[in-house]
Amino acid sequence: MSGPVPTPDAPVPTPDAPTPARDASPRVVRGFDELRALAGQPLGSSDWLTVDQERIDAFARVTEDEQWIHVDVERAAAGPFGTTIAHGHLTTSLIPRLVRGAYRFEGADSLVNYGSDKVRFPAPVPAGARIRAHVELIDVTDVRGGVQARTRVTVEREGGSKPVCVAETVTRMLAKESA
């Protein structure tokens, strides 16, 4: 593991890797050996994604979490954040999309979300904010049929001083079956 783990009060880290522009292609990692060699290093940063009220409302309907802080624009204007905010779980549900914008893995038959460790939401995501993710590969371990990769995903809000989400994600990358 390289670098300090972001804490809720820490500023948003800026990986050494260049931050791609909105239309930049994600980094391509080809095969398990290349992935193993990248352990402890930044994999890249995603493009910006706008989290608008329409997305927040849709998430609220699907999850049946329609607290006023998320969906009642007028009431939220007088609330603690001065506007509606995204659900924390909406932010985590966007991690796969954001990670795909940072890097792409080639050489596996399937990628399986195996879970998340240490998920925190140090700052809110106000409606209309733009977010992006910085992805660091923590480690890679062999598992039956492939490898398991742990990544630290730090989601920042444009103009924010703290991350909006810091999560360690676990992905199983399973080898193509041989004949």
Image (tube, helix red, strand yellow):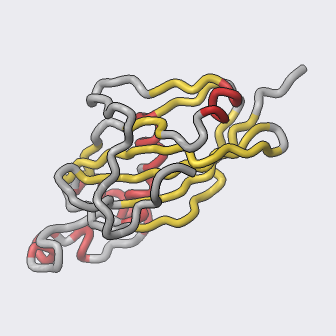
Residue placed at 61% from the left, 50% from the top? 150
In this view of the protein, which residue sits in the foreground, 73 or 117? 117
Residue placed at 45% from the left, 44% from the top? 135
Apparent side of residue 46 relative to residue 162 in the rendered image (left or right): right
Residue 145: x and y in percent read 82, 38
Apparent side of residue 43 relative to residue 91 in the rendered image (left or right): right
Residue placed at 44% from the left, 57% from the top? 92
Apparent side of residue 144 relative to residue 77 in the rendered image (left or right): right
Where does the C terminus fall, quadrant-wise? top right
Considering every residue shown, the one lying at the far front of the view is 3
Q: Quadrant of residue 9?
A: bottom left
Residue 88: x and y in percent read 38, 65
Considering every residue shown, the one lying at the far right of the view is 179
Residue placed at 84% from the left, 43% from the top? 144
In this view of the protein, which residue sits in the foreground, 81 or 72? 81
Image label count: 0
Residue 56: x and y in percent read 29, 59
Residue 93: x and y in percent read 45, 54
Vertical relation: 106 (above or below) 36: above
Vertical relation: 126 (above or below) 43: below
Apparent side of residue 19 relative to residue 92 in the rendered image (left or right): left
Vertical relation: 167 (above or below) 73: above
